[in-house]
Amino acid sequence: MALELLSVEQDGQWVIRAKGEVDLYASPDLRAAILKAVSDPRGGVAVDLSQVEYMDSSGVATLVEGLKSAGQRKVSFSLLAPSQAVMKVLQLSRLDSVFDIRESL
């Protein structure tokens, strides 16, 4: 399944909704959306991962890059409701304690 992305302004911050698979081929699209949102931060950036069915290491690297970029710009960066598949990858890479993970805005 291809990756679908939708960036919307919600409650004063950018929310990037991802649906599908975040793999080597799709992660550049997610990266571009995250970096664009971080550069125009409003009140922060949140990445909704509730509908992501699969994420590989390139997707994790994309999220880490987004977190670092947000930190450099002093912008809040959070992950919203990661799916079970995403949480498993974050836990295996021990990044679940690094990210601000929320169930909702």
Image: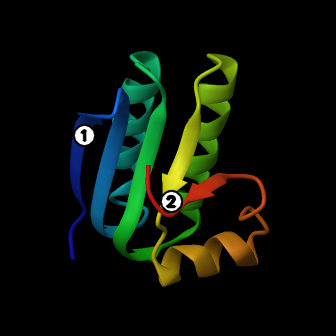
Query: What residue lies at 23% left-to-right and 51% top-to-bottom?
Result: 5
Quarter of the rendering containing residue 4: bottom left
Quarter of the rendering containing residue 50: bottom left
Disc number placed over residue 59 in the picture, else none = 2
Query: What residue lies at 37% left-to-right and 26% top-to-bottom?
Result: 36
x and y, in percent, of residue 28 in the image: 38, 46
The answer to whether residue 85 is above or below residue 41 is below
Relative to 31, is 15 on the left or the right? left
Query: What residue lies at 53% left-to-right and 59% top-to-bottom?
Result: 58
x and y, in percent, of residue 78 in the image: 55, 46
Relative to 77, is 99 on the left or the right? right
The answer to whether residue 62 is above or below residue 65 is below
Circle 1 residue = 7
Query: What residue lies at 49% left-to-right and 69% top-to-bottom?
Result: 82
Q: Quadrant of the N terminus?
A: bottom left
Disc number placed over residue 99 in the picture, else none = none
| Nearer to me, 31 or 38 | 38
Total labels: the figure holds: 2
x and y, in percent, of residue 88 in the image: 62, 81
Question: What colouring style does the render use?
Answer: rainbow
The answer to whether residue 24 is above or below residue 63 is below
x and y, in percent, of residue 93 in the image: 74, 70
Q: Amino acid at mark 1?
A: Ser
Q: Residues within 10 Å of mark 2 (few under 14, many from 20)?
A: many
First in sequence: mark 1 vs mark 2: 1
The answer to whether residue 40 is above or below residue 8 is above
Q: Amino acid at mark 2?
A: Gly
| Nearer to me, 17 or 81 | 81
Q: Secondary structure at mark 1?
A: strand
Separation (CA) of disc 1 from disc 2:
17 Å
Q: Residues within 10 Å of mark 1 (few under 14, many from 20)?
A: some
- Residue 62 shows in this picture: no
